[in-house]
Image (cartoon, rainbow, N blue to C red):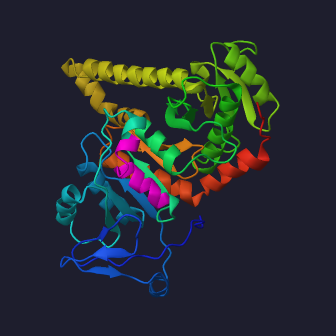
Amino acid sequence: MALNHTCLPIPAPAQGGAFYSRGFPYKAQTSSGIIIIRDILSSILMNKECIMRIVLDAMGSDTYPHPEVQAAFEASERFDLEIMLVGQEEKLKPLMEKYGANSRVHLVHAPEVLEMGDKPARSARRKSDNSMAVGMDMVKAGEGQAFVTAGNTGGAMVNALFRLGRIRGVKRPGLTTIIPTKTGHAVAVDIGANADCKPLYLFQFGAMGSIYAERVLGIENPRVGLLSNGEEKGKGNQLVKDTYSLFEESSLNFFGNAEPKELFGGEVDVIVSDGFTGNVLVKSSEAVSKLLLDVLKEELTSTFRTKMGAALALPAFKNVKQLLDPREFGAAPLLGIDGLVFVGHGRSDALALVNAIRIAKQAVEANLLDSLKQAIQTQLVIREE
């Protein structure tokens, strides 16, 4: 697939390790403390290669920054990317030095951290130089094509709204996730960003989720379902009933109302709900998946006979575990934000973060942001309340 992203010049590595100050992607600090400012035009002439640049929050996961640093080095080599690692220099630089020289992994200093227990809105304002804010500012300035974090979800949403804003015409951004199904995977939106919604919000979630499923996940003409307590038209609460007609009149491939059995049975590719309902759905499915795997493991290792049987079925069990492993996708986008922002689980390890970077790369290559803007502004009628 041909790359459609903006061609960025490749910065030369600094002598004392790659360190880039906020807002100046071509400024590096040497070990002697001398600031070298490279001329952008000269950089373009010297570096004819076009490279994608992903911004990674180094202070996001529960065990930061070790998984982020490992993922940055692995992803830069595996996917031929430039990774801008944003976080506290004093914590990152020693770890980066252990991995050796890599001209495509660069440290961007951000002095503050949004912790998991922080109140999103208050902390985003009080800690204005947090790693999420600095990273999203880089995306806003064109210094990176996408931002990836495994940090505080609420903090990511608030920072994204403050720093990047919404796509014109989008009423509310939607938080997404990937759900395993019998036939592959489905996109769920919203899963927690908007507990209280209006019909237009849900309709736009469906439109954006459909674009994401098609452009990034490769699902042709995605089937969009409206999460309800019954398949029949007229089922559901007032929000679901009022939203149904919006989908019916649209150009989307609307499946209709969908219960969880349609979702997990692979009959829909995008499932739409308000954030409260979606969050309960996702957490319930995660709990049930863990229960099944735990019980299966316990039963298969209870006796010598079951252990022998488990050994023969090991390939099948590995496939099931991989299907249910959230690390395989790593992160999902905040749909409706005017910039590519991907949020992963706080428990993300290096594998999850590498896959999150892979998904972000695919979104850039697929021109996801432009497609979302087109869907909202031109392909689908914006229905004003």
Q: Quadrant of the C terminus?
A: top right
In front: 202, or 292?
A: 202
Q: Main secondary structure of the magenta part?
A: helix
Q: Quadrant of residue 220?
A: top right
Percent coordinates x, y for residue 256 in the rendering: 72, 24
Farthest residue toward the right?
Answer: 249
Percent coordinates x, y for residue 345 in the rendering: 38, 38
**Does the magenta-highlighted stretch encompass residue 136?**
yes
Percent coordinates x, y for residue 322 in the rendering: 39, 38
Residue drawn at (30%, 61%), measured in percent from left and top?
Answer: 73
Question: Can you see residue 325?
Answer: no
Q: Quadrant of residue 269?
A: top right
Residue drawn at (39%, 49%), measured in percent from left and top?
Answer: 132
**Does the magenta-highlighted stretch encompass residue 50?**
no
Using residue 120 as the reference point, say whether residue 267 is left or right of it: right
In front: 169, or 356?
A: 169
Q: Quadrant of the N terminus?
A: bottom right
Residue drawn at (49%, 87%), measured in percent from left and top?
Answer: 45
Using residue 35 as the reference point, say whether residue 214 is left or right of it: right
Name above or below for residue 258 compared with residue 186. above
Question: Can you see residue 250?
Answer: yes
Q: How many marks?
A: 0
Region in magenta: 124-139
Percent coordinates x, y for residue 242 in the rendering: 74, 20
Name above or below for residue 329 compared with residue 41. above
Residue drawn at (48%, 66%), measured in percent from left and top?
Answer: 52
